[in-house]
Image (tube, rainbow, N blue to C red):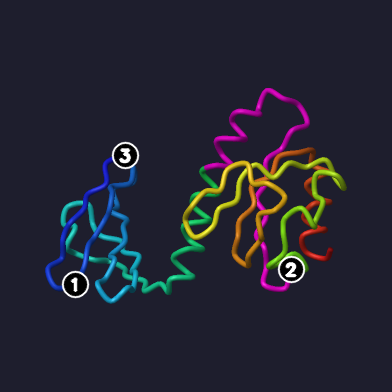
């Protein structure tokens, strides 16, 4: 995928790419620290059809969602020939009993046989997280296990 980067003198920097459907999607990182999600036409990247200002938390959450989906899709593809193995994503909610707690406190693997294979946080991937990694609201956990185990893991992460 080709990402075009354009300096915006006095404003910041734009990074965008062309989708298969002919739309340009990107972000503008403003010098003051704000981020905007933009959609432009294929024939004129300067014609913005939509601009959505994002807070840093919103930008990080969007990055987690998109990155987590990509990672989960790759894992699903890799496990498609293994019957009974499913990949799912879990978001740590602000009211999760495990927010600001080490992941090991939830005992997900012990209690339901599910492996947390990665955590998406603020657009970064933490692969193979250990039990000492502290979970934060907005973290996206990528897990692999049976359907029943993943259902149990979701319940544990929500309710303890």
Q: Is residue 33 left or right of residue 75?
A: left
Viewer-nearest residue: 126 or 23 = 126
Q: Helix, strand or loop at disc 1?
A: loop
Q: Residue at x 61, y 45 (%)?
A: 118
Q: Is residue 83 left or right of residue 42?
A: right
* Label 3 vs 2, first from the N-terminus: 3
Which of 50 and 125 lies nearest the eye of the viewer? Answer: 125
Which residue is painted at 72% across and 73% down in the image?
A: 95
Circle 3 residues within 10 Å: few <14, some 14–19, many ≥20: few
Q: Which mark is residue 97?
A: none
Earlier-in-chain disc, 1 versus 2: 1
Residue at the farthest left position: 9
Magenta span includes 122? no
Marks 3/2: CA distance?
A: 37 Å
Extreme residue in the top direction: 81
Q: Bounds of the magenta span?
A: 71-96
Q: Nearer the viewer, residue 133 or 22?
A: 133
Q: Residue at x 85, y 44 (%)?
A: 110
Q: Quadrant of the N terminus?
A: top left
Instruction: Inspect the magenta stretch and tell me whether residue 73 lies in it.
Output: yes
The answer to whether residue 56 is above or below residue 79 is below
Q: Give the crowd class for mark 1: few <14, some 14-19, many >=20 residues within 10 Å.
A: few
Look at the numbered disc 3 and give the secondary structure of its residue. loop
Q: Which residue is mark 1?
A: 11
Location of mark 2 (residue): 96
Q: Residue at x 47, y 69 (%)?
A: 58
Query: SS at mark 2?
Result: loop
Q: Residue furthest bottom?
A: 32
Q: Nearer the viewer, mark 3 or mark 1?
A: 1
| Residue that badge 3 annotates | 1
Q: Quadrant of the C terminus?
A: bottom right
């Amino acid at each position: 995928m080709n990402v075009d980067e354009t300096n915006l003198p006095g404003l910041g920097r734009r990074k965008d790419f062309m989708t298969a459907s002919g739309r340009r999607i990107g972000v503008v990182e403003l010098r003051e620290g704000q981020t905007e999600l933009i959609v432009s036409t294929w024939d004129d990247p300067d014609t913005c059809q939509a601009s959505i200002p994002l807070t840093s938390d919103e930008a990080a959450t969007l990055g987690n969602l998109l990155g987590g989906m990509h990672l989960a899709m790759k894992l699903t593809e890799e496990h498609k020939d293994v019957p009974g193995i499913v990949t799912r994503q879990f978001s740590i909610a602000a009211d999760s009993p495990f927010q600001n707690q080490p992941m090991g406190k939830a005992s997900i693997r012990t209690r339901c046989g599910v492996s947390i294979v990665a955590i998406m946080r603020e657009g970064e991937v933490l692969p193979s997280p250990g039990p000492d990694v502290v979970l934060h609201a907005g973290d996206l956990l990528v897990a692999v296990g049976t359907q029943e185990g993943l259902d149990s893991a979701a319940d544990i992460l929500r309710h303890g």
